Image (tube, rainbow, N blue to C red):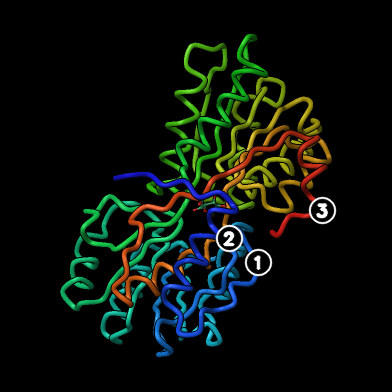
Amino acid sequence: MKKRFLSGMALAGAAAFALTACSSDGGDTGSSDAASGDGGGGGGDTIVVGFAQTGSESGWRSANTESMKTAFSEDNGFELVFNAADNDTAAQIAAVRGFINQGVDAIVIAPIVEDGWDDVLTEAADAGIPVILEDRTVSASEDLYAAWIGLDFEEEGVKAGEWAAEMYGDEETKMVVLEGTTGSAPANDRATGFDAAIEGTMIEKIDSQTGDFTRDGGKSVMEGFIQNYGVDNIDLVYAHNDDMALGAIEAIEAAGAVPGEDIKIISIDAVHDGMQALVDGKINYIVECNPLLGDLVAAAVTGVINGDDVEAVQYVEDLAFDQAAAEAALPDRKY
Ligand code: GZL
């Protein structure tokens, strides 16, 4: 499927175009997050949207939920029926079935894991309810959803791995990995991209385990790695998100080592606490994963409801930060 990369300005344009094309009064797109704009119901009727969110596992998720709730506001022409599934896939699928039974106008899903969606997406299609995916992807047929808006997780892994290869690839480096939620697209793809980027270097992956994208999970898995290998035998941590990296920092400090110096840390997301740890030298590099998708998703829902052409795949571009770049960017960050 054709990839379409949207930078900040392009996002604003895309969202503004979609809103102008759809809203009855031309809409004041305003300027807020990566996709400035304000969502906007089509033709003045309220659009009832069921949103099945993963849960509240991380700082990234909180920012994503806030962005979605802001975009799908009553003022913007929506009635949002929100469900957070507490990282429980069965509960998330049940929530989607509930939206179908409720007869909502559209369903938005941030799918916890890639697999297991064929049946309920088919039920939504049979009920004539369009589905838009945001953030993560699914393995089900692309015919079962109208659009996906999110990030290129494999590219995020490549960016992180290329920096690791450049900085540490020429010397024997023992690495442990804090994986995201097992079976999720970001965990799968960030591993694939990173592993490809460090191929042929002297970085050796000695262990890899899921911390489920949570700070507690990252801390307890890192404690186990330190217990098994000894703090002096781990040189690098690759964390699939900042929350797990922040948990690992706690474990490393509790073991009497210095994060960012004795044990280097590379992470993904660039949420505020992660960027602060990067400025403080406790994390060495962060690849961004922009959670502010609400306006683009709202524009896609409005477009689908109005029968407009909506880009089926919309990637939001990510930046990457070393310590100097984080110091410069942190004051102006929106999440
Ligand atoms: C990525 C998103 C991931 C974040 C985590 O788009 O799905 O889930 O990287 C979040 O912080 O929990």
Residue 227: % across, % down: 64, 32
Is residue 220 visible to us here?
no
Q: Which residue is mark 1?
A: 32
Label 2: state its secondary structure.
loop
Distance in Å between CA atoms under marks 3 and 2: 17 Å
Residue 193: % across, % down: 46, 31
Q: Which residue is mark 2?
A: 292
Amino acid type indicated by mark 3: Pro
Q: Which residue is mark 3?
A: 331
| Mark 2 neighbour density, 10 Å: few (under 14) some (14–19) many (20 or more) | many
Q: Earlier in the sequence, mark 1 or mark 2?
A: 1
Amino acid type indicated by mark 1: Ser
Task: Say which quarter of the image contains residue 266.
Answer: top right
Is residue 168 visible to us here?
yes
Which residue reaches farthest bottom?
Answer: 45
On screen, residue 46 versus residue 141, left or right, reads right
Amino acid type indicated by mark 2: Leu
On screen, residue 249 versus residue 73, left or right, reads right
